[in-house]
Amino acid sequence: MNKKELYQQKKQAQLDEWKAELDKLKAKASGGSADAQLALNKQIETLESNIEKGKTKLAEIADASEEAWETGKEDVESAWDSIKSSFNDAADKFKK
């Protein structure tokens, strides 16, 4: 397995983990007060959007040539930073 395939597998595993965490957040949000649900639903929408962006970036890498994927890797890392930040924000809201 080459570096590109290993990288894709690692990032796909992270996406799968985030999707599972998102499902947990959705379940927690549905059990809260109406105000809490509204606030958390906004966070959840942001997370869903960021995960979709991450999927798109990962697909772009999958379609890229062996040489070009290294360049696209920066876009993937940026998307991952955004997703991670969104999850941290959501986790902070759940703690309050």
Image (tube, rainbow, N blue to C red):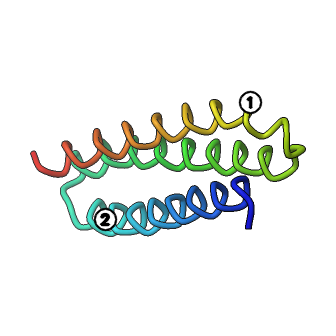
Which label sits on residue 48? none
Q: Is residue 64 left or right of residue 91?
A: right
Q: Residue at x 72, y 60 (%)?
A: 5
Residues 5 and 59: in front is 5
Q: Residue at x 85, y 46 (%)?
A: 66
Vertical arrangement, residue 38 with respect to residue 33, above or below: above
Vertical arrangement, residue 83 with respect to residue 16, above or below: above
Which label sits on residue 71? 1
Vertical arrangement, residue 33 with respect to residue 24, above or below: above
Q: Amino acid at mark 2?
A: Ser
Q: Percent position (x, y) of residue 78?
A: 55, 31
Give the quarter of the image for residue 88.
top left
Residues 44 and 17: in front is 17
The 10 Å Cα crowd at callout 1, few under 14, some 14 to 19, many 20 or more, is: few
Q: Percent position (x, y) of residue 47?
A: 47, 46
Q: Is residue 4 left or right of residue 34?
A: right
> Which mark is first along the chain, 1 or 2?
2
| Picture mark count | 2
Question: Residue beneath label 2, please?
Answer: 30
Q: Amino acid at mark 1?
A: Thr
Q: Residue at x 23, y 67 (%)?
A: 31
Q: CA distance from mark 2 to mark 1?
A: 41 Å
